[in-house]
Image (spheres, rainbow, N blue to C red):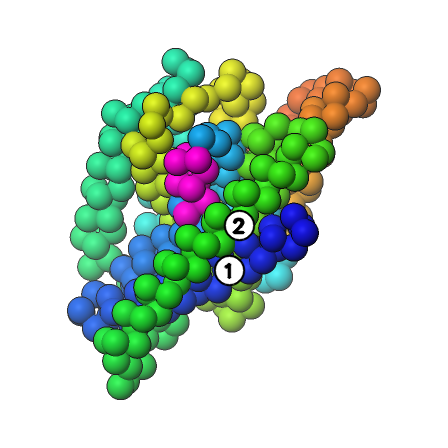
């Protein structure tokens, strides 16, 4: 019964997010907001609405580990799994300059979360600062969208054009219905996740970092993979980066504000999980800068690291004997080899650019 409730909760979150995005997109377009801004804000943020609903429900219910684990786990999942899978479907050419600006911001915000968490709690003042950052970020996107190329604007206009004859009543109904499903789905998902954690004898944090994070990120999976198949390269990548920024500033910020005493951050999270989120954000820089592309081999690399990350969490939760060997292999062999490979590829790409400029 618990598994049925968990799956049903995810289903309601996906349907609710889809209804919310569709209704909000049409309303925003009717208000004269450009398709580019809609794609970068309404859609990217709308696909993160399950994370928001689940984390706020968990924070209000006294399960801060699920709220925190959901945000950190979703950000890791978005980059490693979704970008990796999208790149395997079709190599992603990242031509949108705004994405280049968003990745450093994603790194800075991830590091800021670590700084906030060093005292063992994400307080209401910390959350307020993150929400203020969200408002400033949205304003910047609207300002920056005016400078985008015609090619990028056409891509977003084609994807998020408003159908004619769509009524305000219908779109308002979609938004309200979507929100209702998100609330109900989040309740089912959080309650069942707590039951699963108790049954398996693992912490709520591990459940939040893994199955809850993956479940609430399914809208991003669908959006990015479909965009990749259609060749809408900026949407596939922009959705992931925008969602990660929303997770930190809106989801974590609002949860810190509404939680009665803030969100307690266990020492294990500041030692491992948040640093992993920072490293994953850093990993985007060399990949994006190697010709502004994410190739299939880089996508496979990202997916491989997500499998390794999940395996580590499982081994750690079970206190398995293989954990020290696995950790040493990743720390002293796999990660250094990957870094060297990315640096070499980046240097070769820079050298190739200089050679082409001389010609």
Where in the figure is residue 121, as x and y percent of width and height? 39, 20
Q: What residue is drawn where x is 25% and y is 76%?
A: 169
Q: What secondary structure prevails in the magenta region?
A: helix
Give how far across and how far down residue 161 sits, in percent: 32, 75
Residue 140 magenta: no
Q: Is residue 2 left or right of residue 273?
A: right
Query: Which of labels 1 and 2 is toward the front?
Result: 2
Q: CA distance from mark 1 to mark 2?
A: 9 Å
Question: Disc number at residue 188?
Answer: 2
For disc 1, the marked residue is: 12
Residue 198's place in the image compared with 359, above or below, is: above
Image coordinates of residue 115 in percent, x first then y, are 37, 19
Check residue 59 for magenta coloring: yes
Would you say the residues marked 1 and 2 are in contact, meaning their CB atoms lie under 8 Å apart? yes
Graded by Cα atoms within 10 Å as few (under 14), some (14 to 19) or many (20 or more), the crowding at tag 2 reads: many
Front-most of residues 105 and 341: 105
Furthest residue toward front: 1
Horizontal relation, residue 228 to residue 130: left or right? right
Residues in magenta? 53-61
Is residue 329 shown to the viewer in this render?
no
| Closer to the camera in the image, 341 or 92 | 92
Image check: 168 left or right of 251? left
Residue at 28% x, 26% y: name it: 124
Q: Which residue in the rendered view is the most extreme toward the bottom?
A: 165
Viewer can see residue 268: yes
Tag 2 secondary structure: helix
Residue 26 image point, x, y percent? 29, 71
Would residue 215 be found to the left or right of residue 175 on screen?
right
- Sooner in the amino-acid sequence: mark 1 or mark 2: 1
* Residue found at the very far right of the displayed protein: 321
Vertical placement of residue 299 versus 260, above or below = below
């Amino acid at each position: 019964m618990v598994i049925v409730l968990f799956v049903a909760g995810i289903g309601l979150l996906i349907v609710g997010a889809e209804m919310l995005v569709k209704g909000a997109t049409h309303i925003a377009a009717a208000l004269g907001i450009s398709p580019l801004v809609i794609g970068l804000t309404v859609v990217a943020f709308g696909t993160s609405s399950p994370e928001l609903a689940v984390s706020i429900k968990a924070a209000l219910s006294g399960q801060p580990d699920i709220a925190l684990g959901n945000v950190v786990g979703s950000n890791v999942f978005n980059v490693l799994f979704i970008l990796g899978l999208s790149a395997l479907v079709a190599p992603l050419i990242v031509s949108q300059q705004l994405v280049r600006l968003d990745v450093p911001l994603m790194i800075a915000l991830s590091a800021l979360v670590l700084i906030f968490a060093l005292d063992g709690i994400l307080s209401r003042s910390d959350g307020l600062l993150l929400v203020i950052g969200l408002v400033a970020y949205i304003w910047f996107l609207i300002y920056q969208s005016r400078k985008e190329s015609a090619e990028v604007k056409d891509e977003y206009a084609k994807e998020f054009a408003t159908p004619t004859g769509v009524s305000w009543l219908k779109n308002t109904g979609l938004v309200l219905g979507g929100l209702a499903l998100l609330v109900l789905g989040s309740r089912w998902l959080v309650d069942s996740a707590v039951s699963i954690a108790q049954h398996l004898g693992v912490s709520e944090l591990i459940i939040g970092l893994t199955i809850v994070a993956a479940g609430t990120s399914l809208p991003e999976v669908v959006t990015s993979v479909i965009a990749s198949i259609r060749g809408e390269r900026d949407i596939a990548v922009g959705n992931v980066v925008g969602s990660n920024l929303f997770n930190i500033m809106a989801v974590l910020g609002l949860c810190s504000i509404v939680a009665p005493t803030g969100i307690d951050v266990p020492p294990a999270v500041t030692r491992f999980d948040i640093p992993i989120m920072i490293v994953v954000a850093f990993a985007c820089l060399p990949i994006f800068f190697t010709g502004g592309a994410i190739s299939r081999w880089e996508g496979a690399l990202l997916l491989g690291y997500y499998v390794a990350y999940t395996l580590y969490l499982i081994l750690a939760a079970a206190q398995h004997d293989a954990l020290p060997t696995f950790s040493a292999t990743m720390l002293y062999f796999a990660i250094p080899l990957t870094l060297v490979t990315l640096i070499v590829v980046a240097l070769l790409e820079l050298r190739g650019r200089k050679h082409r400029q001389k010609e």
